[in-house]
Image: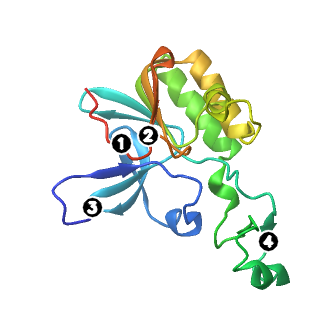
Amino acid sequence: MAEKPFTTLFVCGNYENFDQLYNYPIEEWNGGKIHKINDSVFHLMRGQVFKIDGKSFFTFGGASSHNIPDGILEMDDPRVLRWMFDREKMYRVNHVSWRKEELPSEEEMAEGIKKLEKNDNKIDYIITHSPCTSFLKQMDGNTGLYKPDVLSDYLEKIKNTVNYRHWYFGHMHVNEEFPSEKSTCLYENIMLLK
């Protein structure tokens, strides 16, 4: 991707290799902190405000893994080998297919609030991986499959205090518009921001 004639920006999801991601150098870029993967690929860190082409962007990656009812196992747990090919088991392995950093730290959340307040709680675009709690509930259809968590509740607070033009999020593996909420869940679609 380094050879591409454009810059690729991303927020982290919940399946990232955070052990590796957090080893990239941290730099300031367009007003916020990034992990610089290479000269044209940047991880937009949590709780940052970026100014890009005259627009402001608040970024906050991460999300809860909801598909782990059988738990988080350590690599030396004998169940890992027993369950490896069992499609009925829904588990993750710590530091292999799951990392606690999928959810933010208190410091990251506090930094996000501080950066938003510094911008008078006005942002053109909010870019997150996780939906806020109210979006999560709408998308869940009251099945109870997706439970609110510290991140979705944090994002709900942001939704209720920040004046934003549009909010884009992913995580739910669907393309769905929420016009009354000025929000879009993206999965396969590509959107042009104006």
| Image vertical order of residue 169 relative to residue 63, above or below | above
Taking the image as shown, residue 60 lies to the left or right of residue 3, namely right
**Are there few (<14), some (14-19), or many (20+) residues within 10 Å of tag 2?**
some
Q: Mark 4 to mark 2: distance in Å?
A: 30 Å
Looking at the picture, tell me which residue is in the foreground, 148 or 99: 148
Dividing the picture into quarters, in which one does residue 142 lie? top right
Residue contact between numbered discs 3 and 2, judged by CB atoms under 8 Å: no
Q: Mark 3 to mark 1: distance in Å?
A: 26 Å
Residue 89 x, y percent position in the rendering: 76, 68
Q: Amino acid at mark 4?
A: Leu
Closer to the eye: label 4 or 1? 1
Q: Amino acid at mark 2?
A: Leu
Q: Amino acid at mark 1?
A: Asn
For disc 4, the marked residue is 73
What residue is rendered at 26% in x and 65% in y? 1
Residue 91 x, y percent position in the rendering: 74, 66
| Image vertical order of residue 63 relative to residue 132, above or below | below
For disc 2, the marked residue is 186
Residue 137 x, y percent position in the rendering: 68, 29
What residue is rendered at 60% in x and 28% in y? 135
For disc 3, the marked residue is 39
Closer to the eye: label 4 or 3? 4
Q: Mark 4 to mark 1: distance in Å?
A: 34 Å
| Image vertical order of residue 96 relative to residue 56, above or below | below
Looking at the picture, tell me which residue is in the foreground, 27 or 21: 21
First along the sequence among labels 3 and 2: 3
**Are there few (<14), some (14-19), or many (20+) residues within 10 Å of tag 1?**
few
Q: Secondary structure at mark 3?
A: loop
For disc 1, the marked residue is 189
Residue contact between numbered discs 4 and 1, judged by CB atoms under 8 Å: no
Q: How is the image coloured?
A: rainbow
